[in-house]
Image: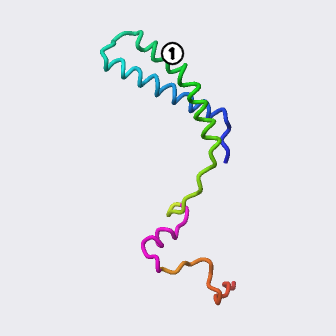
C-alpha cells in the first residue's frame, strides 16, 4: 500500500518542527533563559530547520523499499506452535497420500 506523498511529508515536517522547537525550548530553559523571546526563537528555528528536514526525511522514507512481512504468530497461526515445538507436524499442505474430504 502506497502512502500519498503529501500526508507523509506534512506529518514528518510537523514532527521535525516540534522536535527541534521543543529541544530548543528545553535547552533554553535549562540555561536559565526565561523570556518570551526563547519561545519565539525556538518556533522560528523549528520552522526554518524542521520543514526542510521533514521533507528530506519523507523523501528518504519513500525511497526505501518496504520491509518484508515478518513471519510471526500474528501473521501465521502455526508459527507460535513451530517455535514451541519444531518437531510438531504442520497441518498444511496436506500429505501426499491424503485424499480431499468428500461431502
Q: Is residue 84 magenta?
A: yes
From this view, report whether residue 87 is shown above or below residue 43: below
Q: Quadrant of residue 70?
A: bottom right
Query: Which residue is the extreme one toward the bottom?
Result: 97
Instruction: Using residue 32 as the reference point, say whether residue 16 is left or right of it.
Output: right
Question: Where does residue 102 sit, x and y in percent of width and height?
Answer: 69, 85
Instruction: Using residue 6 as the reference point, say whether residue 38 is left or right of it.
Output: left
Q: Residue at x 66, y 84 (%)?
A: 101
Instruction: Using residue 25 as the reference point, say whether residue 65 is left or right of it.
Output: right
Q: From which residue to which does the magenta span run?
A: 75-87
Question: Where does residue 4 sit, x and y in percent of width and height?
Answer: 68, 38
Q: Is residue 36 magenta?
A: no
Instruction: Using residue 13 as the reference point, say whether residue 24 is left or right of it.
Output: left
Mark 1 sits on what residue? 44
Q: Residue at x 40, y 10 (%)?
A: 36
Label 1 neighbour load within 10 Å: few <14, some 14-19, many 20+: few
Q: Residue at x 67, y 44 (%)?
A: 2
Q: Residue at x 58, y 34 (%)?
A: 57
Work out which quarter of the rendered image holds the C terminus and state it: bottom right
The number of numbered discs placed on residues in the rendered structure image is 1
Q: Quadrant of residue 6?
A: top right
Tell me how the rendering is colored: rainbow
Amino acid at each position: 500500500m502506497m502512502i500519498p506523498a503529501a500526508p507523509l511529508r506534512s506529518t514528518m515536517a510537523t514532527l521535525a518542527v516540534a522536535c527541534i522547537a521543543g529541544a530548543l525550548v528545553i535547552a533554553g530553559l535549562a540555561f536559565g533563559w526565561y523570556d518570551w523571546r526563547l519561545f519565539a526563537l525556538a518556533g522560528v528555528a523549528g520552522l526554518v530547520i524542521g520543514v526542510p528536514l521533514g521533507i528530506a526525511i519523507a523523501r528518504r522514507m519513500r525511497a526505501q523499499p518496504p520491509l518484508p512481512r515478518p513471519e510471526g504468530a500474528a501473521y501465521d497461526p502455526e508459527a507460535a506452535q513451530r517455535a514451541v515445538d519444531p518437531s510438531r507436524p504442520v497441518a498444511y499442505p496436506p500429505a501426499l497420500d491424503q485424499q480431499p474430504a468428500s461431502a
